[in-house]
Image (cartoon, rainbow, N blue to C red):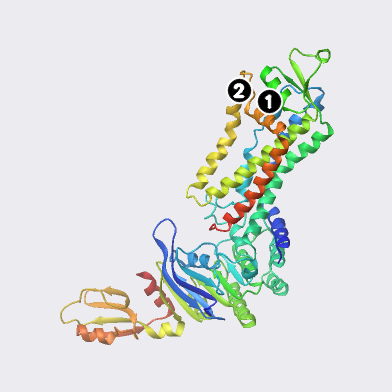
Amino acid sequence: MNTPKQFWALFKFQSTINPFIYFFPLVFGVPLLIPLMHSSFGKDYHPSLDTLLMIQNLFFVGMIGAMLVSPEKYQFGGLNASTSYYGTEFLLTRAINRPVLYRARVTLWYLLVLILPLITVLHALNDPDLVVEEYATTVQQSCLTQVPGSTLLPSETKKHSTELISIPRGNVLVAEWQFWMFLLTAIATQVLLVLLHPIKYGKFIFWAFFFAMIFLPLIFIFDTIGKGTPSLYEALFFSFTSHQLLCWILTASALVLTQLGCERRFVTFEH
Amino acid sequence: MNESPILVQKVSRAYDGPPVVRDLSFAVKPGSIYGFLGRNGSGKTTTLRMLAGLIRPQAGEVRILGQDPFTIGAAERQWLGYMSEKAVVPAFTRVSSVLNLGRELYPTWDGTLADALIARYDLSRKKRFMTLSQGNQRLLSFIMAIAPRPRVLLLDEPAANLDVVARREILDDILDLIRDCGCTVLFSTHILSDVERVADEIGILAKGSLRVSETLDSLKDSIRQVRFFGFPNGIPAGDIPESFRAVRGKDEITITLRTNSVTTPETLARRWSCQQETRALNLEDIFVELSRN
């Protein structure tokens, strides 16, 4: 059987293997849409760039990754469980090429974690321009210098005491940035899963990272409140907007290299 | 090139502790059925998992149709059928999806055979795997192993959780498969009557080492339990060479040994100046005697 047919057969099978894999993207992905829908709630500006950029649900990328890519390894009791929910042993002992199974699983994982960020990009295309309120001068300056086309709104249009910044295609930029963050997190998680797989306590290290991903965004928020400097998210967003092409080229290269490297590693793992 | 479709040479394998399998060697003749016996934890499943390419030996080598099963691709793996001792088919998957996957992955998939077995075992295609009874789960796993018409079939406890009728049917299906396409079968089991019924050769594994590997007739002919008694100078001390098991009583020693080895019951009786009484063993007796030590 040729590789594309095998890939398609495995992808179809994987996608029906466990309905719970669709639960987490729905629950944790939908909040992504809410900030971008803010403008449709009747206001003509967004109250803060930082809250717009805040992504607190990146951790679910890791959760789905552990469930799909190497499920028995990263579930407690998984290898000895009497019931299999992902069928790794079953699939590995069928007439398949192991890299193709890995590719099918990773493809499904990436689709699940990127589908909602992709929807936010498409949604943003309907209402591309962004007006955001920003009181901190340093952040204003960073935004004006690093985000292409951004301008301070003329005073006659000001309705508020703090400055408003107009960013043409700003909503699209924010959605693209969120998509990019999800993609980067997925790539990093893929590398982490494969690196930790052969380690005896790799499962525990992975889940420690996982919980760190849940709480780190909160720490970043508390660290920047009231300081008037760009938060980590804002700094990343400004870097992304000022080097967009380079970011996408590097990410695409990382994606391909990670996939090829991980496939080669996956075939050497015992199950 | 070695002609044995299933070859295990000086294989050792441990997990986190002592070796589960140590220095294990055996070969299965083409078109034969090899019954793999052993107590729980004796290393049967580990050996089968190595042969299925799920884990690798830490020493020695395993070969399926002359190739390393851990590294083979789809083209070679289509000739290897494997049924795990566990319910490894994904729990939420429907029977029809599992069969579809088999049909899509295997160019050699025998849809007629699969359909016939599904009908004979009365399996519902619409049911999810987890809603099947344990016996029916085993039957579906068995169908997935034999419907591709493999050249080598590895079955880990295929008859576990099955009623006697289904067990008989599975054994008949295995025999049919061998008759139709010369498949070589290695199966592990606790059910000795199954082994007696179909196996051409038997291997008994104890604590990771193969105690015997030969035909059932040869086993029954050569292994005996001998009672030595009437010792003039009391029970002799020390190890008894080439014996499988020795139990010292107050006035007698009962030894399980091969009658065709260098140390025969007669030589021992002469050495100890005692009398001896020999008893033939059935497969269950042999299994118990060889596995106990």
Name the secondary structure under disc 1: helix
- Look at label 1 and name its amino acid: Asp
Quadrant in which residue B239 is drawn: bottom left
Quarter of the image for residue A9 reads bottom right
At label 1, counting other C-alpha atoms closer than 10 Å, the crowd grade (few under 14, some 14-19, many 20 or more) is: some
Residue ID at (17%, 77%): B234
Q: Is residue A36 left or right of residue B156?
A: right
What residue would you read off at disc 2?
A224
Question: Residue B158 location, x and y as percent?
Answer: 56, 69
- Residue marked by disc 1: A50
Could you say where residue A116 lies in the image, as x and y percent from the top left?
A: 74, 40
Q: Chain of mark 2?
A: A
Please state which of residues A165 and B200 is positioned toward the viewer in this rendering. Answer: A165
Q: Quadrant of residue B111?
A: bottom right
Q: Residue at x 63, y 74 (%)?
A: B150
Q: Please state which amino acid type lies under the numbered disc 2.
A: Thr
Q: Residue furthest left?
A: B233
